[in-house]
Image: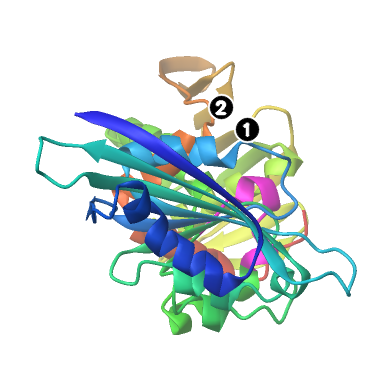
Amino acid sequence: MESQTLHWNHPNIMGPELLELLRTSVPQSLGGTLPVTATVLTLGLYVKGILPTDWAELAGKISRVHPSRVLIINPIVNSANAPTHVDAELSATITYRRPHEPPILFSECVQMNLQGGLANHWIDLVQSLIKSDLPAYLLWLGMPPLPGFRWDLLSTGFSHLVIDTEQTGIEPWHHVMLQSPRLGLMIDDLYWQRLGLWRVHWANVTDRPEALAVVSTPESISVVWPVEKSTGWQMLLGWLVSRLSWQIVDIAPNRLLVATESGDTIPVHITTGADPGITFYQGNRRLSSQEAHNQLTTQFEIGSDVLYEISDPCNLADPVSDVVKLLNRGHDQLYDEAMSALLLSERPEQ
């Protein structure tokens, strides 16, 4: 089947006009024919303050796998007296079928530079563009908004908020994370998605009974992690705490204390280093995992002897692949459990 991407440029328009253009542009370009719609979700990209990127190209790559109506939201804060308007670019990918069959509207992209009053009050406009009968994800690229942001309004349109705590840390998102169950807003994290390599790797390693014993009943744990990516070890620790029914009972800047179900305590020592690594100690046994040179490697040692070593290749971070994998898998309940374990305790500033 032949495909074609149509483009329209509409500077200096108002919100209602944008909604009408989105509704009518494709049929008018097809000579009045109404296409069959194949989109399966709405995907919002909030890109305020992010380095300029070809967002339409990124949206197109995602839509090839998950046909979407993509809304690129870019508030531009100028002077207080700047006129309220939208500079919009629309595109639609059409697939043509056999003669006398209506074409398929495969995906749409609405790129919005919001100015004037819309730069601060954009939720109502964006809500009107969401396809209400389909799942709606908002990918928030960058730091969260200031306190007072109306997450309650946003959550009536977007059912999923996708963040990236590798870039922002966990702390700035605590407020909305605590609100999200009440709002019915599911939160997903691209960094959690990337850390899936660690979780799968450890699951394979602990298929060996001696490795499982050291990981599940350690006498102490040592964490070495780049300070700018400290969210990684925090989420992995939260995952272990939730899976093993542990509890974080004491916090200091470079040390945590974890309590087990049996009442034992496990000190967790935290230092900074270039290559992420976590080591579990039990007597003269040690299980250490380190990510370096695009490999995640675990060694199991007794005394000075290395009994075995297991390595897995690391997947390099790629925004399109991260989002596609997240959409493929859907919301991960294990993420909720890991974050709940962390949010029960106040985290130290890193």
Q: Is residue 296 magenta?
A: no
Check residue 276 in the rendering and tell me which mark sits there, or answer none. Answer: 1
Secondary-structure class at tag 1: loop
| Any part of residue 191 in sight | yes
Say above or below: 82 vs 137. Answer: below
Q: Nearer the viewer, residue 232 or 112?
A: 112
Q: Which quadrant of the figure contains the N terminus?
A: top left
| Any part of residue 246 in sight | no
Q: Residue at x 51, y 63 (%)?
A: 339
Identify residue type, mark 2: Gln
Q: Where's residue 235, x and y in %?
A: 54, 52
* Badge 1 or badge 2: first in the primary sequence: 1
Identify residue type, mark 1: Pro
Q: Where's residue 114, x and y in %?
A: 69, 63
Image: magenta residue range: 162-173
Indicate how the structure is coloured in the image. rainbow
Q: Is residue 169 magenta?
A: yes
In the image: residue 310, left or right of residue 227 = left
